[in-house]
Amino acid sequence: MNCQNFYSQIKVHTIVNSLFSSKTYVIYHNNYNFCYIIDCGDYDKIKKWLKENEKTIVGVFITHTHFDHIYGLNELIKEFPKCVVYTSNNGKYGLASNKFNLSLFQGKDFIFNKEEAIQILSDKNRLELFTGIFINIIETPGHDWSCLSYFIDDLIFTGDSYIPGTKVVDTFPKSNKKKAEESIKLILNQVKSSSIIFPGH
């Protein structure tokens, strides 16, 4: 089987979360009994999908650490204690701060409770998800200082760094308008006619 055909067997399941309609994406391959997710909202919905599809989670890739993209993490890590949580260096601070992750302003006071599960990602890192299938990481700050975008061949997961047809919000405490504009250009330069964009909302 050639590489392109193998990549084409990657599947994405979309979960629309209850908080601000943020999205969690499940990345899976039928030949494997494990999967990954992009962001972690309503864990009950994630858990239902895992049970129905007989999968386990081995990694969570965080696009940025605003509360509506991370609030299911503590429930997930309790059930899958060996799961790795991938984020940026600034994302590590966001996971540990109710102010940086904005949960303080939602009346939820979220703090991720398993720091040892965190693995820091940097710009241009590349990780193997399944045999011969890689995820590429690009730092795309602006909406938040923790923003990362993820590329798996033609699949692009942009979080809130780029939402087609929507202006990027750059008014949060750790936002930066100039960097947001630069990040959009960076993402769009990677987009091909065959690309599929999966935004954070």
Image (cartoon, rainbow, N blue to C red):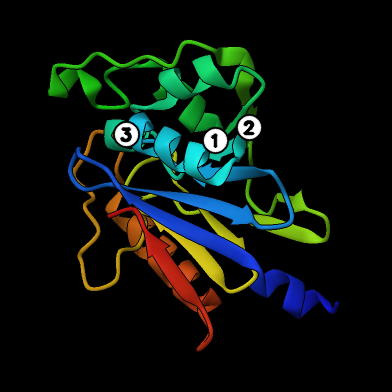
Q: Position of residue 77 (x, y in %)?
A: 52, 20
- First of labels 2, 1 by sequence position: 1
Residue 87, which numbered label? Answer: 1
* Above or below 30: residue 3: below
- First of labels 2, 3 by sequence position: 3
Circle 3 — which element?
loop
Residue 77 appears anywhere in the view: yes
Task: Say which residue appears at 20% left-offset and 66% top-offset.
Answer: 166
Task: Say which residue appears at 37% left-offset and 56% top-offset.
Answer: 161
Marks 2/3: CA–CA distance: 23 Å
The answer to whether the residues at label 2 and label 1 have Cβ atoms under 8 Å apart is: yes
Q: Which residue is tagged 2?
A: 120
Q: Amino acid at mark 1?
A: Thr
- First of labels 3, 1 by sequence position: 3
Query: Does residue 96 appear to the left or right of 53 in the view shown?
Result: left
In the depicted view, which residue is nearer to us: 131 or 176?
A: 131
Structural crowding at the residue carrying mark 2, measured as other residues with C-alpha within 10 Å and reported as few (<14), some (14–19) or many (≥20):
some
Structural crowding at the residue carrying mark 3, measured as other residues with C-alpha within 10 Å and reported as few (<14), some (14–19) or many (≥20):
many
Q: Which residue is tagged 3?
A: 42
Circle 1 — which element?
strand
In the depicted view, which residue is nearer to us: 44 or 112?
A: 44
The answer to whether the residues at label 3 and label 1 have Cβ atoms under 8 Å apart is: no
- Residue farthest to the bottom, as pictured: 193
Q: Nearer the viewer, mark 2 or mark 3?
A: 3
Q: Amino acid at mark 2?
A: Ile
Q: How many marks on residues?
A: 3
Q: Amino acid at mark 3?
A: Asp
Q: Position of residue 51 (x, y in %)?
A: 50, 36
